[in-house]
Image (tube, rainbow, N blue to C red):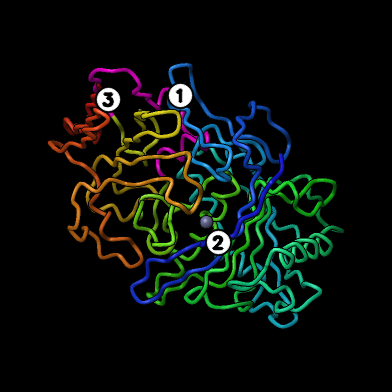
């Protein structure tokens, strides 16, 4: 499998006054193969719970899609269930010496990132950040020598940076014992995240530099601070790391060049600034955090009623997927204000289209807004407001006349569960 490389726009932060646009390299072994569920010590395919009834919902992208919403996720990415060890290194440079201690930088992201994954995964991902080198790891060259900046041909620079990190850490670190790498760069290296978000992940990159005989295939780099000056950095600034780590687990970017308008604040792969948010149910299935019984594949004609429990709660049915063809379908889930979903202002049934044939950053997921052009129901900073009232509530219905699909919200129970009725011709 020959990985190819592509530069794509990374993130248009939904800030009132700031547009943060930058570039990302995402390399993946994008052949579109479905890999059998073998597990190896380090990186490996993601276990996906399914039965034969889920077959029609196992959508996949074409061979040119590098990072797809398809299931199961191909091999090469990090495991996303069980105990996962994240080698976490804090690096600085002679022209950007570490400000404060390296462990201060570490604590901008932990324990919150670990907790975020524990909550989102219902305890199925035990994320262990490990810092065998608790001090700043000084790089041999000044930061500017690596040419890591917006619009720069940064691929050779990154290769050099990873090689230098490996060389500096190798005497004390056995890279074989970790699932992926976090590089927390001193925040004074490079531009402010308000100007340019440099943070990036190389995922499933089999051509990565080798350390202790294994390629550093999955590595997240975090720069600067996603601090919008609203005073919430201590609570929300860590959220860039779970976003970047989402890539090492094989999740694509959901924002596009136009920003977070396709999915809004309904997934951290769409918006990672501002108040906390969770992942879509589709992503939770893709990551192996849902049992087969928690995912209903609505592939047969007729009308079927399903009961959904809030996505943020442990247990119960979480996702109904209505496949349209081998590549696309509608996902249906219940979003409420709990768990990681702290900005939900109109609880209800979120309906979105998943297209496995659309690549990362090109809009593989589209949320349907039950109240278009309403302006939304939140004023939380850095939250795409228009889609904040997207969920459908009892009495409302989503219709795709052309495909003969209707998804009606039949009612809400005192327990907090919702009933949805899916009809298809
Ligand atoms: Zn991303």
Q: Nearer the viewer, mark 3 or mark 2?
A: 3
The image's mark for residue 292 is 1
Task: Name the one closer to the observer, 132 or 22.
Answer: 22
* Magenta-drawn segment: 280-307
Question: Circle 1 sits in a helix, a strand or a loop, which is it?
Answer: helix
Picture quarter containing residue 32?
A: top right
The residue that appears at 67% across and 40% down in the rendered structure is 76
Residue reaching furthest left?
395
151 to the left or right of 215? left
Say few, some or many: other residues with alpha carbon within 10 Å of mark 3 (under 14 / 14 to 19 / 20 or more): some
The answer to whether residue 281 is magenta is yes
Establish if 19 lies above or below 374: below
Q: Is residue 316 visible?
A: no
Task: Please provide percent x and percent y for residue 86.
Answer: 66, 51
Say few, some or many: other residues with alpha carbon within 10 Å of mark 1 (under 14 / 14 to 19 / 20 or more): some
Location of mark 3 (residue) = 306
Question: Circle 3 sits in a helix, a strand or a loop, which is it?
Answer: strand
Task: Please provide percent x and percent y for residue 333.
Answer: 32, 37
152 to the left or right of 417? right
Location of mark 2 (residue) = 109
**Mark 3 or mark 2, which has the lower sequence index?**
2
The image's mark for residue 172 is none
The residue that appears at 66% across and 74% down in the rendered structure is 101
**Mark 1 or mark 2, which has the lower sequence index?**
2
């Amino acid at each position: 499998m020959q990985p190819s490389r592509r530069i794509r726009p990374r993130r248009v932060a939904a800030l009132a006054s700031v547009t943060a646009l930058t570039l990302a390299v995402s390399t993946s072994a994008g052949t579109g193969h479905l890999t059998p569920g073998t597990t190896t010590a380090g990186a490996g395919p993601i276990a996906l719970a399914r039965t034969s009834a889920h077959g029609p919902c196992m959508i996949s992208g074409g061979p040119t899609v590098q990072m797809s919403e398809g299931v199961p996720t191909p091999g090469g990415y990090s495991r996303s269930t069980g105990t996962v060890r994240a080698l976490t290194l804090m690096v600085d440079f002679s022209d950007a010496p570490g400000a404060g201690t390296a462990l201060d930088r570490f604590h901008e992201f932990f324990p919150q990132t670990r907790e975020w994954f524990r909550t989102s995964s219902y305890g199925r991902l035990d994320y262990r950040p490990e810092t065998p080198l608790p001090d700043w790891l000084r790089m041999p060259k000044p930061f500017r020598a690596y040419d890591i900046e917006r619009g720069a041909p940064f691929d050779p620079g990154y290769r050099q940076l990873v090689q230098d990190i490996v060389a500096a850490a190798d005497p004390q670190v056995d890279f074989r014992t970790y699932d992926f790498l976090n590089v927390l760069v001193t925040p004074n290296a490079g531009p402010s995240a308000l100007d340019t978000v440099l943070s990036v992940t190389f995922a499933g990159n089999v051509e990565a530099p080798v350390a202790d005989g294994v390629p550093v295939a999955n590595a997240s780099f975090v720069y600067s601070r996603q601090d919008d000056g609203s005073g919430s950095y201590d609570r929300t600034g860590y959220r860039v790391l779970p976003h970047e780590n989402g890539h090492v687990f094989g999740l694509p970017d959901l924002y596009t060049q136009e920003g977070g308008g396709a999915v809004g604040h309904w997934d951290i792969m769409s918006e990672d600034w501002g108040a906390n948010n969770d992942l879509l149910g589709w992503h939770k299935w893709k990551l192996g955090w849902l049992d087969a019984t928690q995912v209903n594949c609505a592939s047969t004609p007729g009308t079927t009623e399903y009961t959904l429990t809030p996505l943020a709660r442990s247990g119960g049915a979480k996702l109904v997927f209505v496949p349209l063809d081998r590549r696309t379908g509608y996902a249906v889930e219940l979003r409420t204000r709990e768990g990681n979903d702290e900005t939900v202002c109109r609880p209800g049934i979120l309906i979105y289209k998943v297209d496995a044939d659309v690549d990362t950053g090109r809009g593989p997921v589209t949320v349907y807004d039950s109240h278009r052009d309403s302006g939304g129901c939140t004023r939380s900073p850095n939250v795409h407001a228009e889609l904040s009232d997207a969920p459908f509530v009892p009495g409302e219905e989503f219709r795709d006349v052309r495909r003969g699909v209707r998804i009606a919200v039949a009612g809400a129970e005192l327990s907090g569960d919702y009933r949805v009725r899916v009809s298809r011709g």
